[in-house]
Image: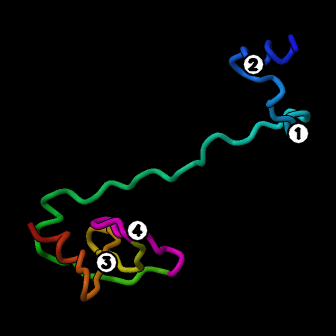
Amino acid sequence: MQIAQTLAHLKSNPLKRRSGMAAEAGIVPAKHLIHSPVTPGPTVDVRYDGMNHWPQYGEKKKKKRCKFCKFGYTFLYCAKCNMHLYLLPSRNCFKAFHVK
């Protein structure tokens, strides 16, 4: 009975510790994933100059998130700004990105 009362008053229960082969072998899991660095966007002058901004298709391996709305992934990117942007009838992020 005294053991049960002592365990009830402890802040952490030593019996609930995780044990396993990884802990016994001394293997420590990775804490964080390594992310690629963020590429800077174009300057304001280049973004809104209205010249030579042409949509181009990238490779299938280069499918990236739209930099304007950030909702989904697209193959299209601006040839001058090098920013991936949607160009759909329902969502034209390409035009919205280049117009003030």
Closest to the camera, between mark 1 and mark 2, is 2
* Amino acid type, label 3: Tyr
Query: Mark 1 highlights which residue?
Result: 20
Q: Residue furthest bottom?
A: 89
In the image, residue 14 lies at what x, y percent? 81, 23
Residue in the image at 44% along x and 70% along y? 64
* Residue 16 or residue 42, whichever sits in front: 16
Instruction: Give the CA distance from mark 3 to mark 1.
Output: 48 Å
Closest to the camera, between mark 1 and mark 4, is 1
Q: Which residues are magenta?
A: 60-71
* Residue 91 or residue 82, whichever sits in front: 91
Q: Earlier in the sequence, mark 4 or mark 2?
A: 2
For residue 91, side relative to residue 98 (left or right): right
Q: What SS does tag 2 mark? A: helix
Q: Is residue 6 above or below residue 85?
A: above
Q: Quadrant of residue 3?
A: top right
